[in-house]
């Protein structure tokens, strides 16, 4: 420690954080098999969870802001609604994803 050490001075602040509302407008493609790349369309989806049936997935966001995930092998074939949970809100697409063998 040098002679220039000074104690911390605490300053009161009035800080507010505005969180942008997420939107989820759909996805593509509408069908595929295991390991199909599903592109999610919307805004402010960083940190969201994706729900396909009872399965919870975490999407990837690339450097360009594209949001996507790959259909995992443990989900059974069928038609699924895809929902997003973000900032305490549920967002669900009107579309169905059909998982085929």
Image (cartoon, rainbow, N blue to C red):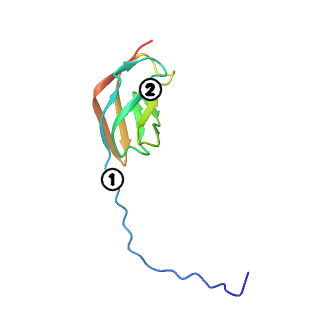
For the C terminus, the image quarter is top left
Real-space Cα separation, disc 1 to disc 2, in angstroms: 26 Å
Residue extending farthest left: 94
Residue ranking furthest to the bottom: 3
Quarter residue 77 falls in: top left
- The residue carrying pointer 2 sits among few (fewer than 14), some (14 to 19) or many (20 or more) residues within 10 Å by Cα, namely some
Indicate which disc residue 75 carries: none
Q: Earlier in the sequence, mark 1 or mark 2?
A: 1
The answer to whether marks 1 and 2 mark residues whose Cβ atoms lie closer than 8 Å is no
Q: For the N terminus, which image quadrant?
A: bottom right
* Residue receiving disc 1: 20
- Looking at the rendered image, the disc whose residue lies closer to the viewer, 1 or 2, is 2
Image: 37 above or below 20: above
Res 98 seen here: no
Answer left or right for 36 relative to 44: right
Q: Is residue 83 above or below residue 98?
A: below
Vertical order, 59 against 74 (above or below): below
Residue that appears at 43% across and 33% down: 68
Q: Residue, x 39% and y 70% (percent of image)? A: 15
Q: Dot 1 lies on which element?
A: loop
Quick check: can you spot residue 40? yes
Residue 30 place in picture, x, y as percent: 33, 22
Total labels drawn: 2
Crowding at mark 1 (Cα within 10 Å: few <14, some 14-19, many 20+): few
Q: Position of residue 8 (x, y in %)?
A: 58, 81
In the rendered image, the residue lying farthest to the front is 64
Q: Determine which residue is flagged by label 2.
A: 37
What secondary structure is marked by label 2? strand
Q: Position of residue 57 (x, y in %)?
A: 46, 34
């Amino acid at each position: 420690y040098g002679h220039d050490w000074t104690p911390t001075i605490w300053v009161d602040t009035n800080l507010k954080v505005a969180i942008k509302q997420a939107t989820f407008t759909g996805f593509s493609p509408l069908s595929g098999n295991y390991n199909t790349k599903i592109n999610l369309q919307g805004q402010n989806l960083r940190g969201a969870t994706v729900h396909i049936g009872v399965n919870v997935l975490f999407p990837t966001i690339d450097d360009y802001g594209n949001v996507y995930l790959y259909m995992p092998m443990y989900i059974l074939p069928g038609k699924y609604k895809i929902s997003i949970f973000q900032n305490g809100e549920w967002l669900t697409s009107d579309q169905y994803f059909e998982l085929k063998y």
